[in-house]
Each structure stands twice: as structure tokens, then as C-alpha cells.
Image (cartoon, rainbow, N blue to C red):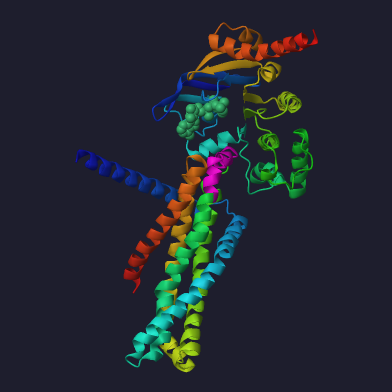
Amino acid sequence: MIRLVDVEKSFGTQKVLNHLNLEISNGKITVILGRSGEGKSVLLKHIIGLMRPDSGEIWIDDQEITGLKPRGLKEVRKRFGMLFQEAALFDSMTVGDNVAFPLREHTRKDEAGIDKLVSGLLREVGLEGIEEKMPSQLSGGMRKRVGLARALALNPEIVLFDEPTTGLDPVMTDAIGDLILETKRKFDITAVVISHDIALSAKIADELAMLHEGKIVEKAPPGAFFNSSVPVIKKFVNVQKFSLPSRDDELANHHD
Amino acid sequence: MFKLINIIGLSITKILSEMGRMVLLFIETLSWVFRPPYRPFLIVKQLEFVGVKSTLVVIITGLFTGGVLALQTYYGFKMFSAESLVGATVGLSMTRELGPVLTGLMVTGRAGSAMAAEIGTMRVTEQIDALSVLAVNPVEYLIVPRVIAGVIMLPILTVLSDFLGIAGGYFVGVNLLGISSGAYINKLIQYVDLSDLYNGLIKAACFGLILAFVGCYKGYTTSGGAEGVGKATTQAVVMASAMILVADYFLTALMF
Ligand SMILES: Nc1ncnc2c1ncn2[C@@H]1O[C@H](COP(=O)(O)OP(=O)(O)OP(=O)(O)O)[C@@H](O)[C@H]1O
Ligand SMILES: [Mg+2]
């Protein structure tokens, strides 16, 4: 279980996380929604110890990580995989070397074994045979999927996804949704997913949480969440839900 | 008046806190030099990078500095009929002073700046965070190989520079100005000690340490996107060059 207790974080005078409390259950997919710039990426970076809170506690199972020394933090991180919002691929390495990086660093597999794993991982994200390409030769969506392959390489227990599908076409978005569900089913991972995509969230989430003004204002299973009476959630959900029917109306009008 | 004091006070605090951060990072870097994982492959890559980037410019500066030294001292010494000392003067100046310092400054401009730009780009594109998340210490992975390469490569480049300076001086003195070849070489051997060469190389190793570490430090602490990377690069060159000249004074005072 991941537990954030009373976490505060400011940048200069700007308060981003404000007495935030959140519990994320093991073996579930928790989707965090929130407006742009609300601090979702900052929240994710706190969970994996890339940022330290000004005050508050962050628990990964029974370990409090805000006070950990680099060595302890490193051990905790070996349980994690993370997909960055902009993928953060190493641009001096080929795609294959990027995905192989964690395997070379933390396993004793030989090169042949690593090659096989890498091509398997790339196949799963729908990018077979691009091992020799450089990250700069890829589209944004492709980079993201390579980042996903790299994050999953070591079969982590907990995976953090920062907007895994932003910038992908709808078909690919659906495929990545399936991949997240599949990974969870196969490896029983705990997943924290940041997303703006209501359809994807509804498809994959066991739990949804809304970040607003530095706090989690609602956390519930999909059914309860989408019917929540919290104004920001209503707005967030409705804007996306009604964009489709209204366009259908337009089409219908055209036919008349 | 108060405002002025305030500004001075603030900039002193800023300088002190930057120095503190530098010292801390330096200690961390040193602590990783003799601790595994050792990364011979990365060190070789950096040796090649520093060497290849800088060889041509070191050749040109060495040759022409030696040439101009011969030209300048020839006219001075001619007044005392001491033209035969040109070789010794060129030799001493190059090995003790100009070889290491000019090489240090040139490599700062070529390789130190490139280190700052490369690591700075990795910082602003979250590649350094990605390293941490993959449980690889970025100081150990990025900074240590570069600093080691700087310390090893600068003395090698300095030998090249010393040698070419003496050769350039020979060409100008003997072939253009008509000093006898025997006199140039005899006086050179008579006055230039092996210890002059060694001390120059120790200086060069220190300059290599300075330029690589400052380049890495500026890159590592970059913030603010592409603009920040540009700033870090310029600052790395200015700071490393100034530090090399200051260090040169103190090393000279200690050695000779
Ligand atoms: N390293 C930092 N230094 C200063 N301010 C920061 C830093 N990181 C984030 N912020 C600020 O914190 C706020 C939240 O940023 P964050 O990246 O978490 O937003 P987000 O919710 O992920 O938005 P988006 O959906 O657009 O990705 C922003 O206002 C941002 O300016
Ligand atoms: Mg974000």
C-alpha cells in the first residue's frame, strides 16, 4: 500500500500540494485525475522519492521514504517502474539500449537473453523491430511506448504512469489501456496512472482520485466517482462526456 | 545605500551557497571514484570524447604558441647576442606554463562546455530523474567517468602541446630566423628538466579535474529548459577558465 499523509510541497510561494492525504491499495489500478498544472506529476515524483515533501509522510508498505538515505531509496526504487510524462528516454542510446538499460544494470542476464527480452517488450507495446532507431527519430507517441517498455522491463511491483496515452491516437490509447490491464493481470502490479482521458480511466480504473487545489477531493471506485457531487469532478466528467453526443446531434441535423 | 548592501549581501549568500553545493557534489563524486560499479566502457568513451574533440585545437595552439614564443624571444635575446637561448625559453615556457594552461583553456571550450550542455539537457528532459528511478546513481553514472577522463586526458594532450610548441619554436627559430639547430636543441636539453615536464603535467591533471567537474556541476544543476542549458554552458566555460587561471597561480607558487 502506498500512503501519503499530510503531504505539503511548495515551489517558492506557490503551494502545489496542500496537506494531501491519499491511500493507494496494492494490486489495484488507481487513476489520478486533475486539471493541467494541478500537481499530478509532482505527486507522482513524491511517491518515488524524486521530490521530497516540505512536510508529511510517504509510506510504501511499511517503509517511510521521505527520510531515507540514497542507498535505502535505491532499494525501494527497484520495486518501482515509472513512465515519465515526456518519456525521458536516454537520447544518446538506441531504443534497444534504452529498454535493455535496467536489465543490464540490475540483472545478470547475457546479451542474447537481454536481446530476446527487449524485442518481446517492444512487441508488447506495438513497436517490433525498432531496436536500432535513436529516440530522436521517433514520434512522441512512439517514445512514450518505448518508455513504457523500459518501465516494465524489470517486472516492477508498482508502476507509475504519467499520462501514458496523451498524444496517442484512439486505437493506440485503447491498446495501451489493454496493456496496462494485461500487465496488472499477469504480474499483479499496483498501478498509479495519471490521465486526462475519461474513457481510458473508466476502462482501467479500480479506483479514481481527483486532485484539486493541492488536495485529493474525492477517491472512489468508478461508479461512485463518476456520479460524484463534487463540482470539479462533475465539470471534468461532463465536459468529456457531452462532447460526443453534441457532435452526433450536429451530424443528425445535417442529415435533415 | 541599504539597497546596495542588500544586493551585495544577497550575492554573497548566493556565491557561498553555490560553493557549498559544489563542494558537496565534489565529495560525492570522489566517494564514487573508488567504489563499484566501475564503468571502464563509459570512461573509455569519455576519454575518446575529450581527446577527439580537442586534439586538433590543441595541435594548432601548441604549434603557433611555440612559434610566436620563438619569434618574440629571438628579437629580445638578439640584443644580447643570446639567440641560442631561444630553445630553452620556448621549452621552459611550454612545459611549465603554456602547455598545461592553454590546453586546459582550449579543452574547457571544447569538451567542458559540451559536458555542461549534455548533462544539462539530460536534466531538463528528466533523463537524470529517469536514471534515479532506474536505481542508477546519476553522479556515479554521469559525472565520475567524465572527471576521470578529464584527469587522464589533459596530461596526454599537454604532452602533445608541449612537443608541438617546441617543434613550432624550432621551425621558426631554426628554419626562419637562422638559429643553429644544435644550439636550439642543446640549450633546450641543458635548461629544461624532466621535473619541469612532470610539474606541468600535474598542473594539467588538476586543470582536467576542474574543467570536467565544473562542466558536470553546471550541467547537473541546470534548470529552466533550453535557455537554462545555454546559460549553464556559458557559465561552465567562464567559471572553469577562471578557476584554471587561479589554480595555475597557486600550483606554480607551490611547485617552482
Ligand atoms: N521543479 C519545479 N520547480 C518549480 N515549480 C515546479 C516544479 N515542478 C513543478 N512545478 C510547478 O508545480 C505545478 C504542478 O506541476 P505538475 O507538473 O505536477 O502539473 P501536472 O498536474 O502534472 O500538469 P499536466 O497535466 O500539465 O502535466 C506547476 O505549476 C509547476 O509550475
Ligand atoms: Mg504532468
Residue B203 belongs to magenta span: no
Say which residue appears at 77% left-offset and 48% top-offset.
A112
Q: Is residue B27 above or below residue B63?
A: above
Residue B131 belongs to magenta span: yes
Q: Nearer the viewer, residue B79 or B122?
A: B79
The image position of residue A166, as x and y in percent, is 65, 28
* Left or right: A131 in relation to A29: right
* Left or right: B13 in relation to B223: left
The image position of residue B72, as x and y in percent, is 39, 81
Query: Where's the N terminus of chain B, which quadrant?
Result: top left
The image position of residue B101, as x and y in percent, is 42, 68
Q: Nearer the viewer, residue A58 or B106?
A: B106
Q: Please provide the residue range marked out in magenta.
A: B118-135
Q: Is residue A142 above or below residue A236?
A: below
Q: Give the main secondary structure of the magenta stretch.
A: helix
The image position of residue B217, as x and y in percent, is 46, 49
Q: Is residue A253 above or below residue B37?
A: above
Query: Where's the C terminus of chain B, which quadrant?
Result: bottom left
- Residue B193 in view of the camera: no
